[in-house]
Amino acid sequence: MSKFKASIIILTKNPERGFPNLLDSLLKQNCSGGREVIVIDSGSDNEVEALVKPRGMRYIQIDPGDFSHGDTRNKGVQIADGHYIVFLTQDALPADNYWLQNLIEPMERDPKIVGVFSRQIPKEDTHPMEKYFLTNMYGENSKVNAKNGQTDLGFDDVFFSNVSSAIRRDVALAFPFNSSLVMSEDQDWSKRTISAGWKTAYAPDSIVIHSHQNSIIQVFKRNFDSGASLHHTFKKMPGGLSKQCKYFWGLIVYLLKKNEIQYLPVALVYETVKALGFALGWYERFLPAKFKVFFGFHREYWLKAANRR
């Protein structure tokens, strides 16, 4: 029997100055049944433990070399005492005190739903390309993903995000995250559970403030890792030329409406770099190991992969 309704797991490494606000927001959440907060830190330079323990939260430290997006989350699931496992990244801030309640509610309503993820809205100072991406990916309408006769589930059929998500603990134990992936462990998990007959859901009334302010180089590297991960989960590359053209046209319209036409040249470079990074990642199996170490955002992962060869 679970001690708590929810165990909130946060993976940290050198969180930003707003991290204390995130921790305080978790203590204010309106959710009956109790909750615990578990922070798993992988070698922060700053005093994460000093922020976590005085707030009555559990602090666990692991060696940076032992971190992986899938395996570290699996470890969190194993030590948690909650009926629901809630994952939240260190840079995502709940927008209100009902984030947790609204995130769990779809699973309370439908026993076939085993995972739910939140809506993400950008920070005010985020550049418009990232704002459009989040607006496009995380809309105002709820959605339930289920296997409806498809022979092969694609990216859009199973999209899920561990930036802010909740999963039934018994299902998380039965379907652990794939620890061999550099990232996108959430998409892989969602596809496997839906393929097994379960459902996942998007809860737009559970909102977190989250966005990245990446440089062009970081955009390339992140998309390289994304492409490499998704290749192991899906048979076909997500998107395609027509979808990318439609997306870019939508971005142009968005910039015009926001009166930010000066970003058009930057947007062209930005989206080209994203597509190039993703494509190279998708075909990373054909690249020399040293190229992957250079191209990848998670350098430690690619170094380990190179040493295993």
Image: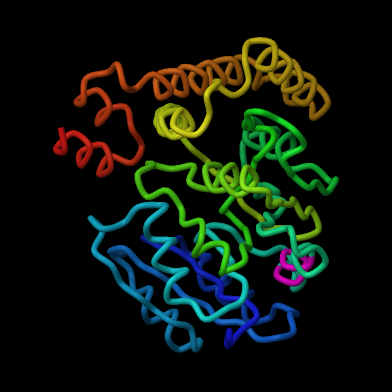
What colour-coding does the image apply? rainbow
**9, above or below 193, in the image:** below
Is 103 covered by the magenta stretch?
yes
State left or right for residue 142 relative to residue 255.
right
31 versus 197 height, above or below: below
- Quarter residue 24 falls in: bottom right
In terms of depth relative to the viewer, which is nearer, 171 or 39? 171
Q: Main secondary structure of the magenta part?
A: helix
The foreground one among 97 and 151 is 151
Residue at (37, 41) in percent of width and height = 182
Place of residue 153 in the rendered image (x, y in percent of width and height, measured from the top left): 64, 32
Q: Residue at x 43, y 79 (%)?
A: 51
Question: Residue 89's x, y, as percent?
Answer: 52, 58
Q: Is 280 above or below relative to 136?
A: above
Q: In the figure, is residue 185 to the left or right of 49?
A: right
Q: Position of residue 68 (x, y in %)?
A: 35, 52
Residue 230: x and y in percent read: 49, 32
Picture residue at 79% right of the left edge, 42% below the top: 139
The quarter holding residue 102 reads bottom right
Q: Quadrant of the C terminus?
A: top left
> What stretch of residues is rendered in magenta?
100-105
**Quadrant location of the N terminus in the rendered image:** bottom right
